[in-house]
Amino acid sequence: MSSEEVFVQQLINGFTTGSYLALIALGYTMVYGLIELINFAHGDIYALGFFVSLSLFTWLGVPRTLVAALPASTLMWMLPMVMLLTMVGTGAVNVSLDRLVYKPLRRAPRIAALITAVGASFALENLMQNWYGPGQILYPNVFPDINLARLALGVSSSILLSTKDVFLFGVTMPLLVALMWFVRSTRLGKAIRAVAQDREAAAMMGVNVERVIALAFFIGGALAGVAGMVVGMYLNTGRYLMGFDVGLKAFTAAVLGGIGNLPGAVLGGYAIGFLSAFSDQYISSTWTRAVVFAILILVLVFRPWGLLGQPPPERY
């Protein structure tokens, strides 16, 4: 590959990684913006989306060892159904975590909720390990994998832009845009912003705060679940611990963009995606985590509230 092709390829890789990281980071930032809780189990909800969607495909008769893609006529009804059920399932699990585990600790010291979130993460990991085992799990190759760049530029091109890349973009981008529109333009979205700004004042104005919190957990869980599904279709493999590494990156993205700020979570997701891709290529994949977290530290030293976050109001 020429240097120009390498650069373009890493742009594609960064955009791919950033897309699903942004989906997961939104769940972190929505929950933190409402109740100031770092939900460490959120990365495992992403992994759960992988396993739930895999189980649905298996239930529909798709073997895990499938190599040839499903026919277009089958994909047209199967993919939307599996995606919708996965989002509902992971969203419901996330809401259940809040109702059963986090809600009783609303007025407890923050360290109690933080430790509980870590415990919930371990519980979900153990559940998935017992469900599918500790080894690497195959995910059926249901979606066709065609190099669109080679079709467009000719066989001499070494750039890989596959139909799976386009599918991932086609799923994540509308969801990101839809969430931004929902939060900014709908009645429930305004309630979410009101609770994030001042829970007590919102409650006095008639907003059902607990219902809004449950809605935020459901949306965050649904987005993380669909991210787990599309990553499974993209990589065709995964395991029960896959949520730890991705969850850590997504949390980093939320902090980098400004925790509690939805556009900041999206910006942070793409920033981490591009940083990881270019570090893998031009430095070394073994140094990528160090590079990403070093840049995060530098940003937070000069902007502790993140790239798009707002400094806290001064108290007198």
Image (cartoon, grey):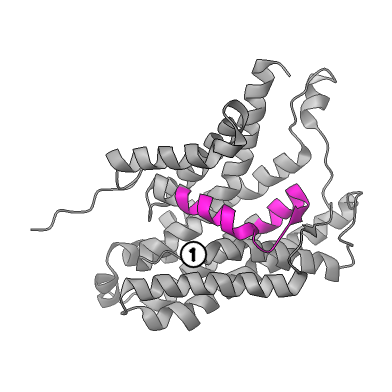
The kind of residue on which mark 1 rests is Phe
Q: Is residue 239 magenta?
A: yes
Q: Is 84 rendered above or below residue 66?
A: below
Residue for point 51% across, 54% down: 248
Q: Is 259 rendered above or below residue 62?
A: above
Rendering coords of residue 252 (x, y %): 46, 49
Rendering coords of residue 255 (x, y %): 40, 50
Quarter assignment of residue 149: top right
Where's the N terminus, which quadrant?
top right
Rendering coords of residue 23 (x, y %): 55, 53
- Secondary structure that dominates the magenta span: helix
Element class at badge 1: loop
Quarter assignment of residue 196: bottom left
Chain part drawn in magenta: 228-252
Q: Is residue 19 visible?
A: yes
Q: Is residue 212 visible?
A: no
What residue is pinned by disc 1?
40
Task: Report the side of 83 relative to 145 (left or right).
Answer: left
